[in-house]
Amino acid sequence: MENRSSLEGHRKSLQDNRDSSEKRLISLCAGSGCGAYGTDKVYKILLEELEKQGLADKIEIKLTGCHGFCERGPLMVIHPEKIFYSRIQPEDVPEIVETTLKNGEIVTKLLFKDLGTKKKLETEAEIPFYKLQQRLIFGKNPMIDPRSIDDYITEDGYKGMEKALFDMKPDQIIDEIKTSGLRGRGGGGFPTGIKWATCAHHDGDRYVICNADEGDPGAYMDRSILEGNPHSVIEGMIIGAIAIGSKQGYIYVRHEYPLAVDNLTKAIDDARKYGFLGKNILNSGFDFDLKISRGGGAFVCGESTALMASLEGKPGRPKAKYVHTVEKGFRDSPTNLNNVETWANVPVILNMGADKYADIGTEKSKGTKIFSLVGKVVNTGLVEVPMGTSLRTIIFDIGGGIPNKRKFKAVQTGGPSGGCIPEMFLDLGVDFDELSKVGSIMGSGGMIVMDQDTCMVDVARYFVDFLKDESCGQCNPCREGLKRMLEILDRICAGDGVEGDIPVLEELGEMMQKFSLCGLGTSAPNPVVTSLLYFKDEYEAHIKDKKCPAGVCKPLFYYEIDADACKGCTLCAKKCPEIAIVGEKKKPHVLDNNKCVKCGICYEVCKFGAVKIM
Amino acid sequence: MEIDYKKIEEIIQRYGTEPEDLLMILQDISEIYNYVPPVLVPFLSQKLNIGESLIYGVATFYKTVSLEPKGKYMVSVCTGTACHVRGAEKLMDALENDLGIEEGGTTEDLEFSLEGVRCIGCCASGPVITVNKDTHGGLDRSTVLESIAQYKKSG
């Protein structure tokens, strides 16, 4: 593209084509979640079947990024009616082609069934999972093939960049971001506009960086944005570069996200071909280019100074922040770093206007936030809601509650730096400030739901074990503190906990929070500290009674079959790999604890709740 | 093992001999050999004009690079939080039994390596494993074995 009017002309012709197309559009989710359930096979058979039934030239298939409802994958939306089919198996495809595409009727068995009303729902808009969301960032995913820059342009893509290049001065862009109230979505929640302004204020070769080293276990919204709509991040970074006065940007993305790397690489190449990156962008006189750097699987590299060290080709070890990175960061130059979701919000703000954007959310947290709702919840997936939406709405109304008639126990938010929130706080609205009042954080948006079968001591041990591996080892409090904590927790889970373990854990936690060098260390004890706060009884059961009430820590429980509840269906005996269960049909079964290896299969398969944790 | 130095030079050229791209160069070398053969360390040191100690430092700091041989198929069991609460440990047990190696190990015929990884970002489909670049989701003890069977040598 030579200039603004050639881009506008191109967009108009693309939109005219879209609006006048007589082809039926099928949007097939090819995000990582659906991919893991076999989208590839469905796609292949769909192509064959369309050919076979003579519809190939009447249908357009878009392989898109994540639609969010990953639990139900593979997902398909058929336009213009927006019929929503889920859990599609390759063998369902001929019927879809015949019944829906040829005859215009619905394949009922592929519709979503509302668990409450038992009604089958035909479109996304009717399904509670989608109905209660506000998808500012994610909404366009189902209309965009992430490998097509034209698809993004058709959906008003790169309009924000045009405004920033031709209609606004850098200061005005920064003011717009300040007015919007946008805060860093990586978890820190620092006001983005202020960060930009401070960086722009320092002289030198300024850099902009996208932190796509999404390391929090249980969070994958950044992955899905990069895979599903990479141009939104690129556009956000171009706008940021114009505002800050940067000529070079970097996207630091995890090597473990190969599809994100591929789609991003293609998107950058295409943006360069279209003249949105490189010299003299759209003849505006502004130069900016982007480079991808692949991270090496180190959690600590999500910390800004460690990430910059890694970008420089060194081991990613954090530095003390006596001088902020906006003044002296990458290559000792002023550097502005934001995470993927933050960058993706930028074009949205410029397009809808800062004031309108600021109407969404709470007083101090504006806009929407994407949460990865996972763990023991019926509807797992990515959920985008206005800031301030309550945990209860997210977990029970959107998420559909806890599966298998189990009871809710806690929700873990904020990844390894966050904490476990018990039932009594479920009505809290989720934003940057609210959850910290009860000892957790919103963080980058991980939300792992736990039920009665989750042991809170085991979860704390899990996070400490994770962080012990990921600690860079530079400072004592973090390196040694985590090791000692893990030793104690390992002992407790093995049944060797002693009186006095809890105070030592608390003391270690306080020491690490006060004296560690970087954010990883200061927040590392949070999972232990919050679980001690709300679930001390579980710790005490492990230490004093030598019991694991949830039935997770193997040395601390055994299974027993309740003779009154057992109907003698024989299922547990059939499934037991150790032949530890015996009994006659329709008579209570008996479990031999000398043979039992506590694999839990009998507990999971029993439909009558007769297998008890003792 | 024969090292194809021409290929290594091509990889370095792709990044323009910037020492800043060391990690990506090591990752690309791993794509060819499944690990970074230590004989390449002095070679890279000379080509990129950086110390061998820095190369060792980087190669041992990051998990995506190994200086020890790995299997043709890297089986990674996700042990992220969501997979953990849904029973990732049980998948690991089943795979250890099936492949006859412990977590972190490689089979003698260099076909399979087994490792636990922290969150691969497929949390909704947990528990999941990846085999090289393929992802398999929604697994349990028995389906996990079905999903790796296809990678085994026939007969």
Image (cartoon, helix red, strand yellow):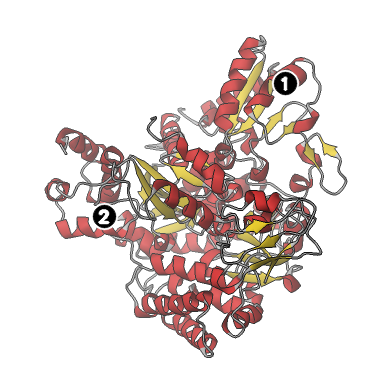
Apparent side of residue A165 relative to residue A585 in the rendered image (left or right): left
Q: At 47% across and 71% down in the image, what residue appears?
A: A464
Cα distance in 3D space between marks 2 and 1: 52 Å
- Residue wearing tag 1: A95
Apparent side of residue B152 relative to residue A90 in the rendered image (left or right): left
Chain that bears disc 2: B
Residue B59: numbered disc: 2
Foreground pick, A197 / A121: A121
Q: Secondary structure at mark 1?
A: helix
Q: Is residue B60 visible?
A: yes
Chain that bears disc 1: A
Apparent side of residue A588 relative to residue A466 in the rendered image (left or right): right
Q: Residues within 10 Å of mark 1 (few under 14, many from 20)?
A: some
Query: Picture quarter containing residue A289?
Result: top left
Picture coordinates of residue A9 (x, y %)?
Answer: 57, 24
Picture coordinates of residue A320 (x, y %)?
Answer: 36, 73
Picture coordinates of residue A294 (x, y %)?
Answer: 37, 48
Query: Picture quarter containing residue A397?
Result: bottom right
Q: At 36% across and 53% down in the image, what residue appears?
A: A296
Up-down: is A510 above or below B150? below
Q: Is residue A246 visible?
A: no
Which corner quadrant holds the C terminus of chain B?
top left
Foreground pick, A548 / A612: A612
- Contact, mark 2 vs mark 1 (Cβ under 8 Å): no
Foreground pick, A576 / B11: A576
